[in-house]
Amino acid sequence: MHRRGAGLGAIKNKTLAQAKYRDKGSEIAEDKFSQMTQQMEMFKTNLEDFARKHKDDIKKDPEFRLQFQDMCASIGVDPLASSKGFWAEMLGVGDFYYELAIQIVEVCIATSPKNGGLINIEELRDKVECARGRNSQSISIDDLLRAIKKLKILGSGFTVINMGSTSLVQSIPGEMSMDHTKILQQAQKNGFISLTDLTQNFKWEPERAARALEFMVKQGLAWVDDQDSSGRKYWFPSLCTNIGR
Amino acid sequence: MDRFEWSDGSLMNGEVHIDQQRGVGIYDGHDKTSFDYGMLSVTSHRIIWRDHRNRNSVISLPLLSVIYLEEQPSGFAKSAKIIVHLSAAPSNKSAGPSTYSAHSYIRLSFRESGEHDILRSLDEALQAKKWEQTSAPLSQTGTVIKDPFSARHRPGIVGIERSIQQKNTHTNKQISVAFEDLNKLIQQAKEMVSLTKSIATKIKEKQGDITENETRKFKSYLLSMGIPNPVTRETHGTGDKYYTELARQLSTVLTKPVEESGGMMTLTDVYCRVNRARGMELLSPEDLLHACELMEVLNLPIRLRTFDSGVLVLQSKSQDEEQVIAHTTNYVGENGNCTAEELAQCLGVSVLLAKERLLLTEKVGGVCRDETIEALRFFPNLFLTRPA
């Protein structure tokens, strides 16, 4: 008597069922995803603890060391987690400051596409602390300065610039900086440029723009013009000749 | 002493390195031997001893012939020792440093201590008897993730949900077991590595990226370029040999990245990258600098360069002076004249570097300068090239 699958009601039922299946499907996928994120967190905390507790043992076993590093790489955990002990504090010995130096340089390189290798020291501290993971002790500005001091022997490419109340850390020396070339490109049209041009067009921090312009004045590439009513302008004589002609 | 064999120091199939200690001497019974100061390694199958100075002098003792161990604590002016009692040498043993010994035991003397760790590792290795199971199937425990419920047929959504739940609990359990202590983690490291990778990629597929934090991304990238066997003072001794080997390793690892970043990289960048790749085996700035200084002598594809400003960089050989001069002379010749700014824009290098290139070329007579108030402009050196 009962025929299935015919009639308007049956079609309605079918679509309803399908919709329900779909909902259930995405619900399961959602669940699975959240569980995976949980497992990831589990890995993270475990790896961080291990890196801190078993550092020497991990170092001793070359094969395992590489595997441990592999795990850290896929999850994004920092394997360097020495704490600042008494001796590190007093004498600067131990791995703490050397590790910190690595983390500092890392943050500087990673952020340099955005800030041109110029970073405020407070921002640097926040980023380093965040990168060290949840086991990190709080890092003071003084710790950063001491760690950077360890890098002094590697040349003047990495310097702290005092700005009165705060400091900037410069990780890209003039020799490697492409900022000046960019400025020249931008100035080509008019033969001059102002600080606001740079902050607006390139979204540079004012400090970054100011330092680059100052550098070019010092190098004899740019001339300062304070007579303009709209603010200071920097002229590039080598570009002006092209415009005149 | 006659139980020892000569070795090349490499591990056999299925053999696992467990522990090592430097500054260990070997006594044949009570008598001193010429194997006086070296690196002692304990593996799952053997005891291996490497001479500190002569790297070709490596001897090994199969754990199979060890009967039992005895500890002899350190005394006045005496290092701590481990007495290793041995069974008779097997007849099919390969050649060793001595063919006859009056003693049935050797003593390991720990001049730089560390005897407790070694004793523990040795004990564990002896109990594990890994050499008996050859390289046959490794532990069956963790490798096969067989869902006990998958055998039973469970249709419907509830079944699917349940099996997912089961799998999930299993993975959770696996992770917490593996991280119970270090030894467990070492045993299951391989599975854990693949598990982390699969979780990371799955999350990536869903979310785009694990994190939008640029530092963390960069760190992952650097860490993933691990150096499998970093040169350390432990493996390569002190002095020149250490630095030469280090320089060579640095050059293999860095040549490509330096090339990619425009043929030049500051030493601070190098310090960060190298140490990340080495993982926990950190390199001090001093050692790094010293190794880099040797690169030129060793004729490696990258070398250290100091700018007048005191900036230190590693430079690839493609940035060689002669090539730079030839290239710059050419460029100025083709364009009729140029300033440092123009050269910088054209080559995509910094203004300072461009200027430096021009000055260098000028020094060898490739170009001439015209110094005016507007700019320092360089022209082809017609004094040399055009016949009078």
Image (cartoon, rainbow, N blue to C red):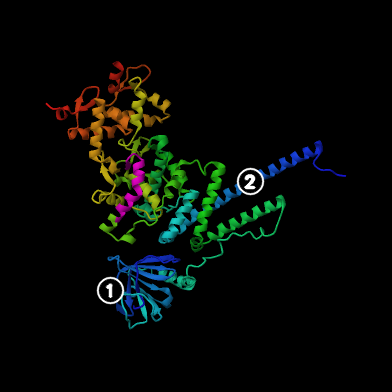
Where, quadrant-wise, is the N terminus of chain A in this rendering? Answer: top right
Where, quadrant-wise, is the C terminus of chain A in this rendering? Answer: top left
Between circles 1 and 2, the one closer to the viewer is: 2
Residue drawn at point x = 42 percent, y = 26 percent: A201
Q: Residue furthest right?
A: A1
Residue B175 drawn at (x, y percent): 55, 57
Q: Residues within 10 Å of mark 1 (few under 14, many from 20)?
A: few
Q: Residue furthest bottom?
A: B102
Disc 2 marks which amino acid?
Answer: Ala
Q: Residues within 10 Å of mark 2 (few under 14, many from 20)?
A: few
Residue B263 drawn at (x, y percent): 32, 41
Magenta range: B245-265
Which image quadrant for residue B68? bottom left
Above or below, B291 relative to A202: below
| Side of B367 where B265 appears, left or right | right
Give the chain letter at badge 2. A
Is B249 contained in the magenta span?
Answer: yes
Which residue is tagged 1?
B34
- CB atoms at circles 1 and 2 under 8 Å apart? no
Task: Check residue A29 in the rendering and tell me which mark sits there, or answer none.
Answer: 2
Residue B339 drawn at (x, y percent): 26, 27
Disc 1 marks which amino acid?
Answer: Ser
Front residue of A31 and B311: A31
Task: Check residue A16 in the rendering and tell me which mark sits there, or answer none.
Answer: none
Above or below, A162 relative to B84: above
Which image quadrant for residue B48? bottom left
State the separation of the CA atoms marked 1 and 2.
Answer: 67 Å
Residue drawn at point x = 22 percent, y = 27 percent: B378
